[in-house]
Structures are given as C-alpha cells and as structure tokens.
Image: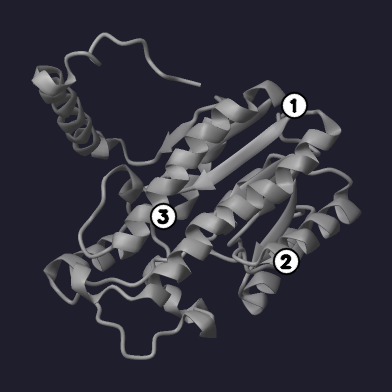
C-alpha cells in the first residue's frame, strides 16, 4: 500500500506546471488533493482534469501571499477530507529581471510575498493540522537550483529561493520529532511558464513605469532553456521517489552537481583562509555554538 493512500495534500500553484504535475502524481498514489491557485479559471480546469482521472479533488482559489485566504483553505480541506497530511508549497513567480541598479521595491516585494511568505504561511497554516491528528506528514517546499547559487539579473528570485532552502533546513530539524518530513525541491530548467509570471501579477505590485528587463544574451538563453527544459512529469516522478525516501534536498538535474560542488569548494576555501587569519586564532578550536 502506498504511504500516501487515503491521505490529503494541499498543493499551491496547482493549476498548471510543476504544481499540477505533483498533484496528479500524488493523486495517482491515492491521495486526496486540495488544489489551489490564484488563477480561478485555470484552477477549475485543472481540478476537472484530476477528477476525470478519478482523483478525489477539491479546489480553492488562493493567493498564497494572503494569510487570511490560507485559513479558508484550511477550513475547506478539513470540511472536505477530515485531515490534512501534506502541504506542497509550489506557487511562485519569476519576479522582475534586470541589472542591480534597476531593482524596484514593488518587484522585490512581489517575489518576497509569493515565493517566501507564501511558503511561510503555508507551513504556519497546515502544520498545526498535521500535528492535530498525530499521524505525521510532509512539507514539500519548491525552491530552485537558483537558490543553490544565484544567477545574474534575477536577484529577487535568487534570494527568495535561497531563503526557502534555508527555512526548509531549519524546519526539517524542528519538526522531525513530530514525524513531519520536510523536503525542498530544487529543479533547474523545467518546461513551465515561470517566465510569464506577469500574467498573475496583482495590481498592488505593478510598477509605475515600464519594467527594465535584462534583454541580453543571458536572459534570452534562460528563457529558451526553460522552454526546452525537462517535462514536469519527470519532476513529479522524482518528487514521489524522494518523498518515499524522506530526502531533504530533491534534485532533478544531477548534471548540475559540478556547479554546486564548485560553490561548496569556494566556501570551504573561505574557511581555510579564515583559519590562517591571526585575528581568528582564538576562535579556531572553540567549541561550536549550536542550538
């Protein structure tokens, strides 16, 4: 029997792309799906697709950056299925692209509110429901390989995805004695419409001027790589595999290992440099200050 059978997952940004594919894969494992998205029309269409496949599905419109809307998701999830066992914090936006000197506060706030606070509100709302029944469960946060090493012209996206990785690491330790497994998905290029996030940008985040996009060879290449990335079904299958193995970091692009290893080497070299510093000799052998 599947570990997921007859349990319930809340999936954000579930109307298409990675979110929909994960919802479908979990549903095929026997889970009840609470599908959410900010786009109501796409949400209804996606929910109907799952129902046609025989997946027990309930849909709730949700702007993940609005904490009050999360309370409605929680209420309807319990009313519909009785218990919640998993939250998939997938909803995200690409944010504004451009050089460092063109950054706009509204663009940053949009990325922070959706990519970071949406994850925070999701966990804050759903974790108590998981604790309530005492059966354990899962948090799956969707970050990005960009969180493992920033890319040019995407500062807000890099920063928010790196933050999601960091909070996932912390929550993993915090919640393990509650039998709540935390995983963070870090894909590279996947065939989604992340580059067209503007279509769902709320009015309060819209700029007072035309956005300055990074129209250079790098940004054009990035869009092309997204469009030619791996299929979302591959990501979903990898997620199921990793959740069953209780993996903290879920990677979908093993060919990126070399890039991450270079970053780790640079970090390790920085520690070596600090060990050589005469200013830090009294700290070198000091007992670690850890919680």
Q: Secondary structure at mark 3?
A: helix
Point 36% across, 60% down: residue: 157
Q: Report x, y in % for residue 141.
A: 53, 45
Label of residue 50 in the image: none
Dot 2 or dot 3: first in sequence order is: 2
Query: Considering depth in this image, is 171 or 184 the residue closer to the camera?
Result: 171
Circle 3 residue: 160
Query: Considering depth in this image, is 121 or 261 the residue closer to the camera?
Result: 121
Label of residue 1 in the image: 1
Dot 1 or dot 3: first in sequence order is: 1
Q: Residues within 10 Å of mark 2 (few under 14, many from 20)?
A: some
Q: Report x, y in % for residue 285.
A: 26, 8
Which quarter of the image is occupied by the N terminus?
top right
Q: Is residue 2 above or below residue 63?
A: above
Question: Tags 2 and 3 in contact by the CB under 8 Å rule?
Answer: no
Separation of residues labelled 1 and 3 (CA atoms): 37 Å
Left or right: 181 as drawn, with respect to 6: left
- Is residue 193 visible in the rendered image? The answer is no
Left or right: 264 as drawn, with respect to 9: left
Separation of residues labelled 1 and 2 (CA atoms): 34 Å
């Amino acid at each position: 029997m599947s570990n997921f059978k007859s349990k319930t997952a809340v999936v954000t940004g579930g109307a298409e792309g990675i979110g929909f594919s994960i919802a479908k894969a979990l549903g095929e494992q026997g889970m009840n799906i609470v599908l959410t998205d900010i786009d109501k029309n796409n949400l209804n269409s996606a929910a109907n697709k799952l129902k046609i496949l025989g997946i027990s599905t309930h849909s709730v419109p949700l702007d993940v950056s609005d904490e009050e809307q999360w309370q409605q998701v929680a209420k309807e999830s319990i009313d519909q299925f009785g218990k919640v066992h998993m939250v998939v914090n997938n909803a995200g936006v690409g944010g504004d692209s451009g050089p460092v000197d063109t950054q706009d506060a509204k663009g940053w706030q949009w990325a922070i509110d959706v990519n970071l606070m949406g994850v925070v509100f999701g966990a804050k709302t759903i974790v108590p429901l998981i604790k309530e029944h005492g059966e354990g469960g899962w948090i799956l946060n969707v970050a990005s390989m960009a969180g493992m090493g920033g890319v040019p012209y995407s500062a807000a996206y890099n920063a928010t995805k790196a933050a999601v990785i960091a909070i996932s690491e912390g929550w993993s330790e915090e919640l393990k004695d509650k039998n709540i497994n935390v995983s963070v998905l870090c894909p590279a290029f996947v065939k989604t419409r992340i580059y067209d996030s503007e279509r769902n940008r709320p009015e309060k985040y819209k700029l007072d001027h035309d956005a300055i996009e990074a129209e250079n060879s790098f940004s054009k290449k990035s869009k092309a790589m997204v469009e030619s990335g791996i299929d979302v079904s591959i990501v979903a299958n990898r997620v199921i595999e990793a959740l069953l193995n209780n993996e903290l970091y879920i990677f979908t692009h093993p060919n990126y290992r070399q890039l991450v290893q270079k970053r780790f080497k640079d970090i390790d070299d920085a520690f070596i440099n600090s060990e050589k510093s005469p200013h830090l000799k009294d700290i070198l052998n000091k007992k670690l200050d850890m919680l």
